[in-house]
């Protein structure tokens, strides 16, 4: 991995971590969800500081460039995260729909007691 | 008729059509109860229903057809109805066919009766009918049964189907759900009905929406279907 990429990755990782911490501070991310983003950003920082980890893993998996190994990992992790968020959104939609229906049904009983 | 039947009328911005729809039901199917589900309309749909004393359930936010219809199914289940029929608010469906559909369900022992435009008549040739034929073919392929008019919005459900539509998530009144019901052992039949063209207001189906709809139904019927749990 070139030193330019290493510096770029380090700067990016530190920025990502700072961004996550700012969101947690403002309460825009729930602490439970923040764990993921904190670990993700922290892992980026660790990889930037110790690029030998990426070199070793890439070598072990037979991937030519350590940068490709990092990209692969990031894409895989984000893919899983997006899929899980899709599940979460489906659950929220279902709950919102149930609540809306119950409110409307309860209202109609009030207007027209049977 | 000793059976209790509920017509569920999901209505979204139907101020121009709702009165004629409900009056049609009152005049031509007086033994059938009805309920208007106002799906968060921004026009005077709910106000008109209240002024005229129509039975109304008003959703505070828009949920879409599936959510609106499900509200009606919950109402049908809680009030112990024997049959529930999906009835469009836009004037396309004729109330005169409601009772014949119930009689057909009783005579044939069907769990679902579809008011079909093409049971006795041939389909006209158009892009929309190509979509309809594709869904028919997929239903035949996955369930072995021939459904002439799978996209008809006029469907009658008996009391074995009502709880599924009332409580199952992702159980929308669409062709893929009919196919799931068929695969679960429900009996589905069709009778010929006449449908009117929209009398007023705007159709929900634009071109891009039609394409998205077809894509969703195709993927649902050909792939997702096999991983869904059968009902009952």
Image (cartoon, coloured by chain):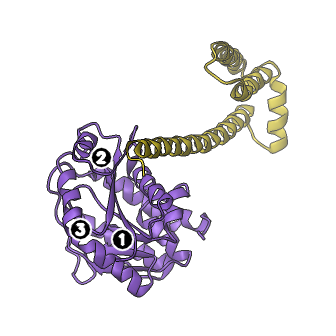
Residue B130 drawn at (x, y percent): 29, 69
**Badge count:** 3
Q: Is residue A109 visible?
A: yes
Q: Residues within 10 Å of mark 1 (few under 14, many from 20)?
A: many
Kindly identify which residue carries mark 2.
B12
User: Closer to us: mark 2 or mark 1?
Assistant: 2
Kindly identify which residue carries mark 1.
B150
User: Closer to us: mark 3 or mark 1?
Assistant: 3
Residue B158 drawn at (x, y percent): 45, 72
- Residue A61, by quadrant, is top right
Q: Is residue A113 above or below residue A25?
A: below
- Pick whichever of labels 2 and 1 is earlier in the sequence: 2
Q: Image check: B117 left or right of B108?
A: left
How much space separates mark 2 and mark 1, taking CA atoms?
22 Å
Q: Image check: B232 left or right of A54?
A: left
Say which chain tag 3 marks: B
How much space separates mark 3 and mark 1, taking CA atoms?
20 Å
**Residue located at (30% from left, 46% from top):** B12
Q: Residues within 10 Å of mark 3 (few under 14, many from 20)?
A: many
The yellow-coloured chain is labelled A
Secondary structure of the residue carrying tag 2 is loop
User: Closer to us: mark 3 or mark 2?
Assistant: 3
Q: Is residue B177 above or below residue B111?
A: above
Instruction: Between residue B114 and residue A52, name the one nearer to us.
Output: B114
- Residue B95, numbered circle: 3
Residue B35 drawn at (x, y percent): 34, 55
């Amino acid at each position: 991995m070139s030193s330019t990429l290493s510096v770029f990755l380090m700067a990016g990782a530190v920025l990502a971590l700072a961004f996550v911490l700012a969101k947690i501070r403002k309460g825009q991310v729930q602490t439970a969800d923040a764990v993921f983003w904190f670990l993700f950003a922290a892992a980026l920082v660790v990889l930037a500081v110790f690029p030998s980890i990426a070199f070793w893993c890439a070598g072990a998996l037979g991937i030519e460039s350590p940068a490709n190994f990092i990209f692969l990992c990031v894409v895989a992790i984000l893919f899983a995260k997006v899929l899980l968020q899709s599940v979460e959104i489906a659950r929220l939609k279902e709950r919102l729909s149930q609540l809306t229906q119950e409110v409307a049904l309860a209202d109609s009983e009030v207007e027209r007691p049977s | 008729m000793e059976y209790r039947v509920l017509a569920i009328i999901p209505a979204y911005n139907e101020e121009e059509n709702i009165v004629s729809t409900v009056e049609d039901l009152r005049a031509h199917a007086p033994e059938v109860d009805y309920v208007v589900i106002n799906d968060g309309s921004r026009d005077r749909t709910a106000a008109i229903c209240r002024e005229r004393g129509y039975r109304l359930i008003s959703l505070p936010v828009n949920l879409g057809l599936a959510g609106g219809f499900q509200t009606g199914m919950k109402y049908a289940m809680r009030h112990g109805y024997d049959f529930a029929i999906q009835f469009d608010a836009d004037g396309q469906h004729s109330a005169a066919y409601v009772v014949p559909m119930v009689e057909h369900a009783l005579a044939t022992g069907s769990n679902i009766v579809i008011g079909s435009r093409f049971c006795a008549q041939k389909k006209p040739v158009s892009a929309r009918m190509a979509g309809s034929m594709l869904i028919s073919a997929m239903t035949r392929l996955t369930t072995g049964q021939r459904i002439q008019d799978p996209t008809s919005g006029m469907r009658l459900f008996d009391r074995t189907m009502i709880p599924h539509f009332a409580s199952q998530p992702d159980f929308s009144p669409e062709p893929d759900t009919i196919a799931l019901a068929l695969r679960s052992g429900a009996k589905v039949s069709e009778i010929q009905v006449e449908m009117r063209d929209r009398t007023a207001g705007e159709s929900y189906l634009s071109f891009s929406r039609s394409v998205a709809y077809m894509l969703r139904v195709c993927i649902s019927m050909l792939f997702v279907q096999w991983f869904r749990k059968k009902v009952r």
